[in-house]
Image (spheres, rainbow, N blue to C red):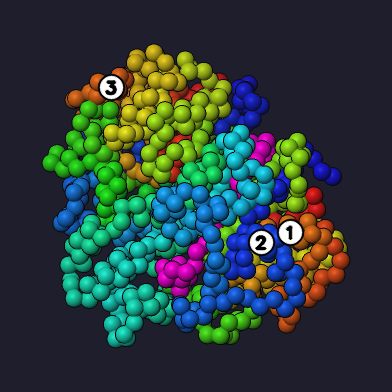
Amino acid sequence: MANLNDHMGRPIVAVTGIGVVTSLGVGKTDNWAALTSGTSGIHPITRFPIDQLNTRISGMVDFLPSSSKGASPLTYELAELAGLEAVTEAGLDSSDFGGPLFLASPPVELDWAERFSLYNSDKDKDDTAAERLLRVARSLRELDIFETTQFGSIADRLADRLGTRGLPITLSTACASGATAIQLGVEAIRRGECDRALSIGADGSATAEALIRFSLLSALSTHNDIPEKASKPFSRDRDGFVLAEGSGALVLESLEAALARGATILGVLSGCGEKADDFHRTRSKPDASPAIAAVRAALADAGLSEEEIDYVNAHGTSTPENDKMEHLALSTVFGERIGSMPVSSNKSMIGHTLSAAGAVEAAFSLMTMREGVIPPTINYDNPDPAIVLDVVPNKKRNAQVRTVLSNSFGFGGQNTCLVMAREPV
Amino acid sequence: MSSPRDVVITGIGLVSSLGEGPDAHWQKLAQPGLQPVLEAARFAPYTVHPLPEIDWNLQIAKRGDQRQMETWQRLGTYVAGLALDDAGIKGNDELCTTMDMVVAAGGGERDEAVDAAILAASESRNDRDVLLNEKLTTELRPTLFLAQLSNLLAGNISIVHKVTGSSRTFMGEEGAGVAAVETAAARIRSGQSTHILVGGAFQTEHSDMLLGYELAGYLHRGPWKPVWQRQGAEGGGVVTGSGGAFLVLEQREHAISRGRKIYAELGPVVSGRARRSRGELDTEIASLLSQAALPGGKLLALSGASGAHAATTAEKAVLDANPAIATRGFSTLTGHMKEAQFPFAVALAALAVERKAAYPVFDAAAEKPFEGIPASVLATAIGYHQFEGMALVNAA
């Protein structure tokens, strides 16, 4: 009889379903094949004109029916696809999931296409732009545009589609959102509120305005000429992240409930840790103490020591600052061992999927353990001498991986780390 | 029976058109026949309840921090500071660095002038995507993005007040406020946390914030009316207000061990998602009521009803069907504060419990008096469009 509770007497949380969509494709099979062959999904932007833009490449998901329909429809479709894959793999009814939904998704705003169309639909009156939009708005007879502006609408639609229970939670912890969605699911199961939870991170918000906003903060790579080479985490010539889209979903289930219904256990969510940073809105504390605290909190929550972590799925954004700070955090926690333990960044291939990243990378972390293959950090041609890490350079590596630490750090002082294991201990 | 792991309220921060702080709100709201503070001209034909005069320096000491925010984040950070002060936590490093935080947030203010210029130029151009690139790359203030990001209200609270245990932001209108309070309470009850800052803010004095309602025709137009009396009037029934509410929730044992005053105990917090298009709202509200409030004597209810016709009608019908319930629709006096609506309702409920007195009727035509001491008070937020929640607040 397996032990059903963890080192703190809480229910062990198993993963029984995984779903993923990135610029590399829809579903685990395509993504894993591309990821382990070192293929990049970064490509030139075609969704909108690139006039005046310093960054002209991205990891947008351009192959879905909603890809050209705006941030809310695309985010919904990404979430739905990943959610369906995960729930189906778990062997559960995809229209009657029967547990709560935690959705990490980008903040929503009225799309420019809609703004233009509302504004130009009634040019007669001599009023301000704001007055005109409001006047046109109140005569709309359909809810489609309205719902793209409601922060709870994507989760509401998903709840209908997938049959989740109760009030769905939509959350944002910036680039750590996907990890937070998983953490909320883990906590709900540990509290005994539910036997299973669906955690999804989805982000289809790579609009021109989003790209320009990040660009104005000097956060994006401008290595436009060879798009697939632009994201180069831990390299000396890294110059920013590559904006991307995607989604990841996990079905989380108490080990007891999963075993009772004969589900396949794909992995275990052993620990979650978080720590907020009060240093700056976009920059991390120079001593990396909040990231260090988040890593340590995740290890403590999992009941594992530093020596028991086999692999780190890094946040690894390819910004000068993140990669330096993350190296400092990891080398502080893991000491000298950090130079010889594998640490790779999926973002070298898929870019930074923002609100989805924590969930996408948790999905890949679980697959890394199941498949016994560590995806590489590609574009590692020019190592940063200040960052001595085994980044699994350029080629996948076969390895037995029992445990993974996955890091997510975001604007607003957000730091969330997950520890996953291949088998229940 | 009280238990060491009960959730108690030890700090309240409030701002609305009525003023700031729990005392000011109690003083005002306890006055029979109080008239709302209204601004009917600036956003005509819409009326809003505007922010009162606020000296931001009192809670956000650094001008540099103030400049990094627009009004919404400033307001939220300010109200959070009031709650931390009230709970005796502000400036206490040990308590702040171990304090968890759940913020219910929408988005921040866009640059209305830049948007208007782009829209004006769009009248004479067909290459609107190119126009966007031209204008946005040259006219957007880089830091404005941060003032718009939902999770940067929490980020600013970390920076200004040093709350750094954890930081989570829930989105989704009233439901975000409900889920924030519900999750915070569950974490304390289960021992996952000892003290949590939870709440939200809403800054309605910006056209985009009105547009968020009006794209579905939810806003009331024409002369102002109390929240229960907008059926049949022009528009959709919602009158918005600027304001915010933050609560410090604490494990009873933790609060007692540091000798803090306890306003009230936070009892059951329940939430739901009625499929309203299938007519489930009435049943859902009734079900939440039966989960939150045990049958007993008379009950005071602080209703967050928005005025939105369908949701408000449904809520009123369910509450009125129980003769023991005396309802107070506080939106009559504050306006609807979206993500902050539920934390505000819980705060007002806690105040009534602590002061051992009910509020007088806010609308003599639609509400009935409540005599005696309210030992338990219900707080509700039935979303104007989706999501529902209630909580029962009990004497400490």
Label 3 Cα crowd, 10 Å radius (few <14 / some 14-19 / many 20+): few
Chain letter, disc 3 residue = A
Residue B286 visible to an observer of this rendering:
no
Mark 2 vs 1: CB contact within 8 A: no
- Looking at the picture, which amino acid does disc 2 mark? Ala
Q: Position of residue B286 (x, y in %)?
A: 70, 64
The stretch of residues the image draws in magenta is: B188-214
Residue B192 in magenta? yes
Q: Which residue is mark 2?
A: B345
Q: Which residue is mark 1?
A: B351
Q: Position of residue B46 (x, y in %)?
A: 49, 79
The numbered mark, 2 or 1, whose residue comes first in the sequence reads 2
Do pointers 2 and 1 mark residues of a single chain?
Answer: yes
The label number, if any, that marks residue A386 in the structure image: 3
Q: Residue at x 30, y 79 (%)?
A: A121
Q: Is residue A389 left or right of residue B178?
A: left
What separation in Å lies between label 3 and label 2 (alpha carbons)? 53 Å
